[in-house]
Image (tube, rainbow, N blue to C red):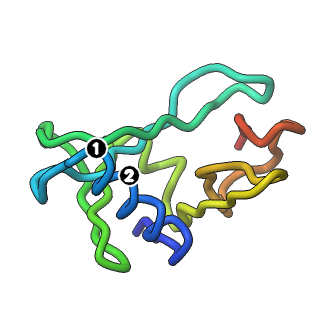
Amino acid sequence: MLFVAESAKAKISEIRSTESLGDDFFVRVSVTSGGCSGLSYKMDFDNEEQPNDQVFEDNGVRVVTDLKSFLYLCNSTLEFSGGLNGKGFFFNNPNAARECGCGESFAV
């Protein structure tokens, strides 16, 4: 399962409204190679599911990821932190053994 915190839900709703994204758009998250610690998160809006996509809905937000990324993201929570010292969107990932100092990448 992938979870969506209330803070992320509010920001996603704001972006959907600002960008005029219809109900057919969902949040796509994935894990890619790169970053200080070896793996990085990627997040975008999409409206086309792919074969082998894993689809979750939490807190009224539909989140889709590919099967390989799900192995790294299982039981993670998408969160949002704003303000001067905010991180923006980030994952609270129980599978990450370590994260880089900037919080942009992780290792398992």
Give the camera-side residue of 13 and 47.
Answer: 13
Image-based side of 3 in relation to 88, left or right = left
Residue at mark 2: 15
Q: Is residue 48 above or below residue 85?
A: above
Circles 1 and 2, Cβ within 8 Å, touching? The answer is yes
The quarter in which the C terminus is drawn is top right
Amino acid tagged 1? Glu
Give the camera-side residue of 45 and 106.
Answer: 45
Label annotation for residue 44: none
Q: Residue at x 19, y 43 (%)?
A: 52
Residue 7 placed where, x, y %? 56, 71
**Quarter of the image holding residue 80?**
bottom right
Residue 8 placed where, x, y %? 51, 65
Outermost front residue: 18
Residue 40 placed where, x, y %? 61, 32
Give the camera-side residue of 59 and 92.
Answer: 59
Mark 1 vs mark 2, CA separation in Å: 6 Å
Label 1's element?
Answer: loop
Amino acid tagged 2? Ile
Image-based side of 90 in relation to 5, left or right = right
Q: Residues within 10 Å of mark 2 (few under 14, many from 20)?
A: few
Label 2's element?
Answer: helix
Q: Residue at x 68, y 58 (%)?
A: 82
Outermost right residue: 101
Q: Is residue 26 above or below residue 62?
A: above
Image-based side of 78 in relation to 38, left or right = left
Q: Residues within 10 Å of mark 1 (few under 14, many from 20)?
A: few
Residue at mark 1: 19
Image-based side of 86 in relation to 55, left or right = right
Q: Is residue 60 above or below residue 44?
A: below
Q: Residue at x 89, y 38 (%)?
A: 101
